[in-house]
Image: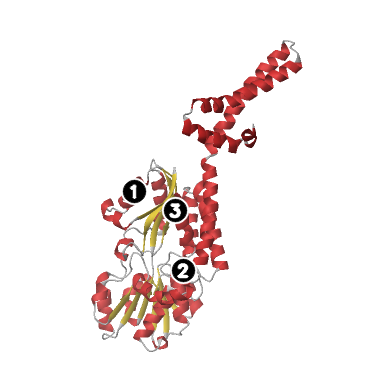
Amino acid sequence: MELIAFGLNHQTAPLAIREQVAFSDDVLRPALRDLTAQSAVREAAIVSTCNRTEVYCATADPAQVKRWLAQYHALDTDHLTPFLYERPREAAVHHAFRVASGLDSMVLGEPQILGQMKQAVRSAEEAGTLGTVLHKLFQRTFSVAKEVRTRTDIGANAVSLASAGVRVAERIWPSIAQQSVLFVGAGEMIELCAAHFCARQPRQAMFANRTVARGEALAARFGGTAIALTDLPSRIHEHDIVVTCTASSLPIIGKGMVERALKARRHRPMLFVDLAVPRDVELEVAGLRDVFVYTVDDLGKIVQAGVELRASAVDEAETIITRGVHEFMQWLQARDAVPTIRALREHGERVRAQELERAQKALARGDDPAAVIEALSRGLVNKFLHAPTEALQRAPGDERSRLVALISRLYPGARDA
């Protein structure tokens, strides 16, 4: 079994591809169980966010995992392959550490990815697909990420997607304080957006969510009101800015809904900040007059402006990550040697038991105890040294030199004999 990570992200795949392979929370655990039902997959965890879908697994056949990802989403493998990257063993460890530390994010140093990876691990634990190797990998991943964020300035002056949404709105209107904002969804990203937008004290803040109680809790926190998601078509025209991020697999805001809203608004402009993957706002909405639509990729271009302020911390972060990778690989390599160590010990135990049985029989016959002990010690030494001695005698020149060097490392006293 080989540790491997593969997937796609905002650097390798456009939003139109990423949304096709996203996993919502309600399907993640069944998907993990389905993946580990494959003959070549022993352990698995899936990280699925608006910017990436990645599979971390212990497998004997990486190609089988790729085929599974495509088939699970009813896609052709050849269609998906150009966008996928593959990271085996040490590269997989290095990649996991960089992702958790915010070095592989659209927003350099953004903190949300660490929480998203922890949630992915909890899902794998609940699905029963997190084995020894992945448990150790993510345990070390979170430790390294914590050290990076504590000891470097990688997260300093970070411009988040949420704050970028505010910047976009302030390009369209002189002041958000005169605008009405509708938040659709109630997850972490909506909370972050609400914090940024409501800090500007908009004229009205409204929260629409499938679970009204959750929407009401957010409304109470940010001084707004709440409605059911089913009320969205009849209330959306009241709002200048719509910020949406749900787990829906299909768009919840369609072209027809927006056309009716624009008519009711007498074509006063509307801004849609769509942070969902798959997208909440139908693609055709962006083609309407008096409408501005910004996706996660659009906002990602805006946040790059603050990257230079944090770039000086990247080298220091990479040093911490490299050290962490080295330590993890030492553990992994030691674990790879466990079957050999176990077999060696079992062989030694068999030799010991055989010689002990022979000595006990000799004592039972009344043989001299001193002679029996001498024979026992000689028997043990001869049997333990038989295999390496024979290997040295039979090995050709170059191989014999390597064996001599190896035996000298295993038995330092042998080099002086």
The outermost residue toward the top is 365
Q: Is residue 76 visible?
A: no
Q: Residue flagged by tag 3: what amino acid is it?
A: Ala
Residue 357 placement (x, y as % from top left): 66, 18
Q: Is residue 170 above or below residue 7?
A: below
Residue at image mark 2: 188
- Comparing 59 with 231, the one in front is 59
Left or right placement of residue 13 versus residue 219 in this view: left
Q: Are marks 3 and 1 in contact (CB under 8 Å)?
A: no
Q: Residue flagged by tag 2: what amino acid is it?
A: Glu
Rounded to the nearest whole Å, what is the CA distance between mark 2 and mark 1?
A: 29 Å
Residue at image mark 3: 92
| Callout 2: SS | helix
- Comparing 392 with 358, the one in front is 392
Question: Which residue lies at the image location 31% right of the left edge and 52% below the top edge?
Answer: 70
Q: Is residue 347 above or below residue 247?
A: above
Q: What number is the disc on residue 68?
A: 1
Q: Residues within 10 Å of mark 3 (few under 14, many from 20)?
A: many
Residue 44 placement (x, y as % from top left): 44, 49
Q: Quadrant of the C terminus?
A: top right
